[in-house]
């Protein structure tokens, strides 16, 4: 048993040892040197002798220097002890040293014996100066208390009785007590505490703290009214008595440095159940958040009734005139929350005002068409980057280049359907993208104009890409309505937009599938066909009332029947124009729309549908002019002319003209390019008078600027957010498997994790399991957030197409994703799994700590979701993004502080802990758990252990006890930083580049 005690005492000293030096002084127990005799001391009540080292033994606290003192007795260590454990107290007095009054008569008799019939307190003449004994925890002037220290760990080291004697002085000028010199305690009214710890009646150390604040409260319980009292004092100072049992008398348990190092704030909390707690940071870290528990406390204060009556009246007036003040941290937190709420309300109010103003703008109606297109000397070169590892990290350095288009010229009038033909690699897609104004990565020269617009101004040019990128969960009508809501002015009534959508559906021949979802949902339906999907893509552009429609291979991948339907629709649009909108819906005068299509290999019937043809070969324009047989006749005349035209193959009657033109473009590289101009045969006249260029250009430009300005969002930000949220809600509601899978998996994982750590105990092993449970939940969030990255990669193509067509701003899109992706698919499942695990594992069972735990978990979920958003937007390759996300999760697990103590990591790598969100998360939820007053109750080699879990936490993991709110602020900083980074990447990098 002795070996176990010796071993455990060494362990305890390692846990709580603090460096400090013993400060010697002449007078012990904070006695003062006598002014009249430097060799003697003025001692506080209860102590005497030349150095105030001898505790009182018998008599009363009014006896002063004449009071009997404890006599020395030999100890087993060979030195003299001054013990007060065997003192016999007079009637009406108790506690170790007989300092605590128990009856009012004892106070009155003792005071009269020393002071005669003199008034107890000067300045209170005429009032009730009857002496009473206050045995409640509340102090009126200066009161004594004596308690028995109760802690299994301390008792294992020191099995005899330990007692704390404490003198609490609230206002010494109101107390009748004197020191041993016969004078009052102090001439000042400052509050203070004097405390002495006795072990087996022998003083071990003494402490003082000042100034102090007393807080008292009354409450009513089932057992009656109870009173609690709390003293909070600053500037704590303690001194261990050399060679006492606690301070070197037993070498294996020398607490001198620990006791001398006790500083800072001291709190003594007592209640009417005769229980008190001696609290200080170091003591709390060892014995729990409640500090050192003291039981069997006895309170005694000799004070006059006049002091009680006067103080009660003053306290009542103060309570009536004021209330409880909030702490600075609470006020700052409320200010931040209030500022965020006010900012959000201000943004919503501003958005509502802008939206309302936009709806009130006059709408003069809009018409599409009447615009021609001409391009002159178009050249386009793509540079090749240098192949180096450094070029993968920085912007590639360009060298050389490949010519895609070489001085290409041509044009088309409004109301005409043009086909751009040529073999693969001829430059068809590049040309139509340049006409549509798409962002290109190469170098472009030449000019593209749109008469009657003046040069430098552009009409509404719609572009239909080769691949159909459509929202699969929406119906055809919903997809077109979505586009109309964002691409048409808000001043246009909703009924007019709905009528326009119906007109477009009818024009495209989609009435039969208008209410059919575009893509497959749960496998029960295939969705619309490929030809119908292509017409939906065209319809998404038509609802914006374009002046020019550009299509990149609209017939690619379609059968001949579907391809003919698509081209017929384009032909009708070119002839009859698009749609004209006004207050009454879709009607009015219509102008022809210029339609340009790149076609790979049309059938003969399909070829003759086009009004004009533009033939490309290796980036050169071999022909630009009317369609039909005109191109064949042009090349036959070139063949008959000889020279370079001799290489032109002959045209056979009845042969598909389109195939003939493709043969020429593929097999006759010697044919010269067209001379600069618009056409080679029967030129398409696109010239307009100067008046048309000026006046007509102004009229068309004014209309476009007012209602359909190119390169601007037609809808306000609030409308964009509303429409996007509406679409996200429909998708989430229809694709129920996505949400319910997340929720179902959360329930399963919660039960699994809760069962794994079911009802963890309060032993050392149980504490390790608690932190392991918290670490498991943090790691689970880090890996489960990978699905957020996949969603971004999956939806990226649709966002790029819609953004390039100015549907909405990236900020509105990110907010809609935050609302309908983060909350239902990240936050809610995380709360479910963590709540189940929390209560099954038996973590802190109170609402405050539970919600503080959920706050940290929700913040960390946001951090990881935004981090995966950043990877998903930063890298086009989803595989690279997933790899980096998985590696970052492993990095966080390493630096979280669970597998390795962070202080043991070499300094060259230790700094990485500051970039690890899981480290702050685990620290915050661990501090929150042990902050609930968790105590470790275990047995070590037969010795009972009863210490605070904070001590084990700091020893094993190095977590700071007061770091919870710091960690929360750091997580907020991660959210803010990652949010700004995501917005910046989406705005600057996540855009369409061709």
Image (tube, rainbow, N blue to C red):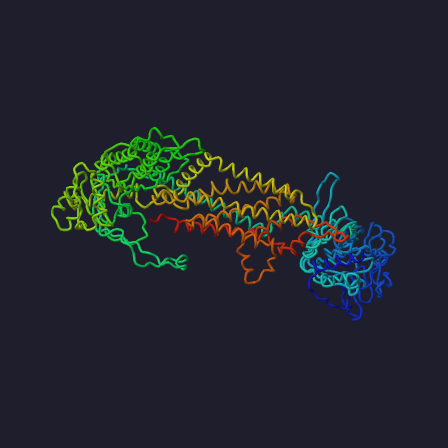
- Residue closest to the eye, 429 or 358: 429
Q: Position of residue 946 (x, y in %)?
A: 73, 51
Query: In the picture provided, is 182 more to the left or to the right than 729?
Result: right
The quarter of the rendered structure image containing the N terminus is bottom right
Q: Position of residue 866 (x, y in %)?
A: 48, 48
Query: In the picture provided, is 523 more to the left or to the right than 241?
Result: left
- Residue closest to the eye, 948 or 612: 612
Q: Position of residue 794 (x, y in %)?
A: 43, 43
- Residue closest to the eye, 319 or 153: 153
With respect to residue 704, does 183 lie above or below? Answer: below
- Residue closest to the eye, 909 or 140: 909
Q: Position of residue 219 (x, y in %)?
A: 70, 43
The residue at the far left in this view is 641
With respect to residue 962, does 688 lie above or below? Answer: above
**Residue 314: in sight, yes or no?**
no
Q: Count the labels in the image.
A: 0
Q: Going 54% across and 58% down the picture, which residue do you hit?
A: 912
Query: In the picture provided, is 99 more to the left or to the right than 626?
Result: right
**Residue 254: in sight, yes or no?**
yes
């Amino acid at each position: 048993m002795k070996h176990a005690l010796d071993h455990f005492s060494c362990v305890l000293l390692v846990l709580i040892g603090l460096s400090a030096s013993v400060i010697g002084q002449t007078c012990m127990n904070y006695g003062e040197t006598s002014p009249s005799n430097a060799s003697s001391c003025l001692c506080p009540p209860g102590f005497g002798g030349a150095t105030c080292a001898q505790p009182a033994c018998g008599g009363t606290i009014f006896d002063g220097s004449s009071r009997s003192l404890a006599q020395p007795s030999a100890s087993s260590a060979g030195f003299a002890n001054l013990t007060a454990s065997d003192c016999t107290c007079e009637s009406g007095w108790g506690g170790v040293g007989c300092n605590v009054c128990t009856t009012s008569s004892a106070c009155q008799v003792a005071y009269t014996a020393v002071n005669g019939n003199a008034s107890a307190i000067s300045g209170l003449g005429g009032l009730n100066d009857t002496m009473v004994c206050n045995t409640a925890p509340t102090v009126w002037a200066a009161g004594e208390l004596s308690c028995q220290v109760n802690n299994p760990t301390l008792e294992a080291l020191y099995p005899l009785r330990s007692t704390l004697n404490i003198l609490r002085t609230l206002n010494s000028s109101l107390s009748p007590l004197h020191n041993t010199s016969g004078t009052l305690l102090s001439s000042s009214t400052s509050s203070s505490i004097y405390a002495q710890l006795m072990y087996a009646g022998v003083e071990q150390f003494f402490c003082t703290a000042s100034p102090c604040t007393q807080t008292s409260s009354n409450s009513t319980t089932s057992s009656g009214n109870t009173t609690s009292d709390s003293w909070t004092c600053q500037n704590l100072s303690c001194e261990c008595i050399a060679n006492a049992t606690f301070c070197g008398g037993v070498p294996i348990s020398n607490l001198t440095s620990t006791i001398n190092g006790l500083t800072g704030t001291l709190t003594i909390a007592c209640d009417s159940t005769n229980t008190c707690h001696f609290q200080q940071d170091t003591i709390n870290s060892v014995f729990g958040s409640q500090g050192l528990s003291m039981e069997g406390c006895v309170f005694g204060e000799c004070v006059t009734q006049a002091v009680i009556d006067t103080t009660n009246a003053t306290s009542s007036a103060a309570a009536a005139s004021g209330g409880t003040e909030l702490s600075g941290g609470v006020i700052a937190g409320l200010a931040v929350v209030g500022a965020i709420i006010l900012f959000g309300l201000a943004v919503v109010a501003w958005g509502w005002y802008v939206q309302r103003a936009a709806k009130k703008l006059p709408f003069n109606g809009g018409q599409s068409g009447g615009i021609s297109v001409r391009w002159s000397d178009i050249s386009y070169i793509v540079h090749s980057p240098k192949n180096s590892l450094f070029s993968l990290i920085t912007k590639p350095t360009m060298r050389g280049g490949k010519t895609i288009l070489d001085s290409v010229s041509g044009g088309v009038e409004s109301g005409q359907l043009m086909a751009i033909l040529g073999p693969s690699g001829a430059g068809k897609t590049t040309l139509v993208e340049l006409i549509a104004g798409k962002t290109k990565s190469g170098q472009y020269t030449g000019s593209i104009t749109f008469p009657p617009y003046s040069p430098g101004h552009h009409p509404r040019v719609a572009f239909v890409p080769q691949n159909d990128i459509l929202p699969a969960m929406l119906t055809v009508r919903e997809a077109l309505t979505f586009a109309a809501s964002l691409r048409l002015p808000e001043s246009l009534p909703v009924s007019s937009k709905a009528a326009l959508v119906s007109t477009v559906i009818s024009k495209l021949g989609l009435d039969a599938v208008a209410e059919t979802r575009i893509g497959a949902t749960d496998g029960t339906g295939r969705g619309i066909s490929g030809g119908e999907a292509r017409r939906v893509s065209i319809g998404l552009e038509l609802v914006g009332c374009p002046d020019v429609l550009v299509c990149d291979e609209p017939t690619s991948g379609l059968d001949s029947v579907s391809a003919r339907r698509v081209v017929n629709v384009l032909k009708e649009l070119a002839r009859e124009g698009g749609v004209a909108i006004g207050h009454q819906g879709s009607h009015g005068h219509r102008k022809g729309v210029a339609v340009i299509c790149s076609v790979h290999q049309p059938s003969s019937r399909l070829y003759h549908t086009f009004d004009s043809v533009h033939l490309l070969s290796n980036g050169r324009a071999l022909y630009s002019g009317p369609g039909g047989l005109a191109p064949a006749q042009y090349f036959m005349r070139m063949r008959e002319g000889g020279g370079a035209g001799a290489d032109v193959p002959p045209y056979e009657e009845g042969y598909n003209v389109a195939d003939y033109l493709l043969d020429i473009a593929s097999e006759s590289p010697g044919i010269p390019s067209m001379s600069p101009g618009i056409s080679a045969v029967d030129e398409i006249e696109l010239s307009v008078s100067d008046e048309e260029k000026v006046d007509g250009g102004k009229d068309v430009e004014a209309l476009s600027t007012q209602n359909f300005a190119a390169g601007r969002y037609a809808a306000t930000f609030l409308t964009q957010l509303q429409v996007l949220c509406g679409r996200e809600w429909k998708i989430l509601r229809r694709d129920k498997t996505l949400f319910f899978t997340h929720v179902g998996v959360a329930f399963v994982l919660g039960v699994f994790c809760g069962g794994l750590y079911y009802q963890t105990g309060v032993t050392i092993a149980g504490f390790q399991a608690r932190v392991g449970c918290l670490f498991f939940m943090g790691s689970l969030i880090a890996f489960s957030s990978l699905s957020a990255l996949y969603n971004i990669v999956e939806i990226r193509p649709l966002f790029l197409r819609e953004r390039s067509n100015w549907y909405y701003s990236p900020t509105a899109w990110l907010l809609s994703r935050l609302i309908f992706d983060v909350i239902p698919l990240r936050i809610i499942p995380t709360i479910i799994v963590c709540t189940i695990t929390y209560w099954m594992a038996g973590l802190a069972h109170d609402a405050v700590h539970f919600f503080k735990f959920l706050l940290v978990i929700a913040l960390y979920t946001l951090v990881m979701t935004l981090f995966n958003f950043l990877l998903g937007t930063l890298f086009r390759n989803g595989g690279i993004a997933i790899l980096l996300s998985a590696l970052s999760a492993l990095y966080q697990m390493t630096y979280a502080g669970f597998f390795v103590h962070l202080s043991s990591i070499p300094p060259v790598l230790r700094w990485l802990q500051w970039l690890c969100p899981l480290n702050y998360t685990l620290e915050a939820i661990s501090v929150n758990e042990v902050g609930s007053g968790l105590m470790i109750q275990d047995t070590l080699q037969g010795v009972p252990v009863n210490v605070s879990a904070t001590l084990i936490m700091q020893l094993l993991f190095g977590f700071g006890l007061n770091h919870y709110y710091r960690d929360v602020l750091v997580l907020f900083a991660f959210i803010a930083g990652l949010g700004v980074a995501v917005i910046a990447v989406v705005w600057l990098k996540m855009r369409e580049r061709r």
